[in-house]
Amino acid sequence: MPIVSTDIKIYLSGGASNSDPNASLGGVISSVELVDNSLHNLFDKITGSEADAGDNEYRCIFIKNTHATLTYQSAKVYIHSQTTSSDTSAMISVATENGSPVQTIANEGVAPSGQTFSTADGAVNALDIGDLAPGETKAIWIKWTVGAGAAAYANDTLVLKTYGDTEA
């Protein structure tokens, strides 16, 4: 049976049992999957002072092929829909390291070193992940930018997607 979407899972980083999205700052892959369609599932609320001054925050997630036997071939990741607030934007970067662990940043305001961020808007601008054999992972860094003077916005969202090939 070919790889299906439920075989490709997204996990937090920050330690083997980390369940706190705010601690998803690189390091070892967590056993905890990223919760989909949940407010603040990866980034915390922006404070008034952060919105006034502007803010860049970073998170690291892992994409994992959980299929038992098939490789997720020529996998790519992209931003399917950019943030819904006009005062925010997101960019992504594929980790320079293979697998887990990856570098750990000191706090959410520190950019990971050696990473090149891209808007990667839409499938035509997707970033290469490469092949993921069964059980293999690749880390993705997400940069969320809040513009200075940002207005309050209750439900800012961002949608990332992956695609790839598989053997029949």
Image (cartoon, rainbow, N blue to C red):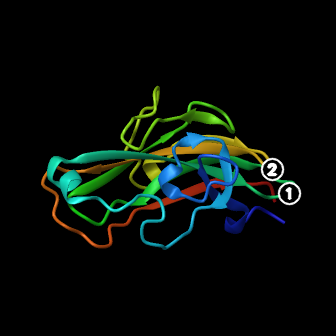
Q: Split into 4 quadrants, where in the image is the N terminus?
A: bottom right
Check the image and report above or below for 153 versus 114.
below
| Precedes in sequence: disc 2 or disc 1 | 1
The answer to whether residue 85 is left or right of residue 68 is: left
Q: Position of residue 84 (x, y in %)?
A: 29, 66
Label 2 is placed on what type of residue? Pro
Depth check: 22 or 77 in front? 22
- Disc 2, disc 1: CB below 8 Å? yes
Q: Which residue is mark 1?
A: 68
Figure disc tally:
2
Q: What's the residue type where badge 1 is placed?
A: Ala
Q: Nearer the viewer, residue 168 or 42?
A: 42
The quarter of the picture where residue 82 lies is bottom left
At mark 1, the secondary structure is loop
Q: Is residue 123 left or right of residue 135?
A: left
Picture coordinates of residue 103, whole percent (x, y): 56, 32
Residue 147: horizontal and vertical position, in percent? 19, 50
Q: Which residue is mark 2?
A: 134
Check residue 107 in the rendering and tell me which mark sits there, or answer none: none
Between 156 and 16, which is closer to the camera in this rendering? Answer: 16
Q: Taking 88 as reference, is 141 left or right? A: right
Measuring 34% from the left and 62% from the top, which residue is drawn there? 45
Q: Is residue 25 above or below residue 150?
A: above
Neighbour tally class for label 2: few under 14, some 14-19, many 20 plus, Cα within 10 Å: some
Q: Looking at the picture, tell me which residue is in the foreground, 44 or 166.
A: 44
Q: Residue at x 40, y 35 (%)?
A: 111
Q: Residues within 10 Å of mark 1 (few under 14, many from 20)?
A: few
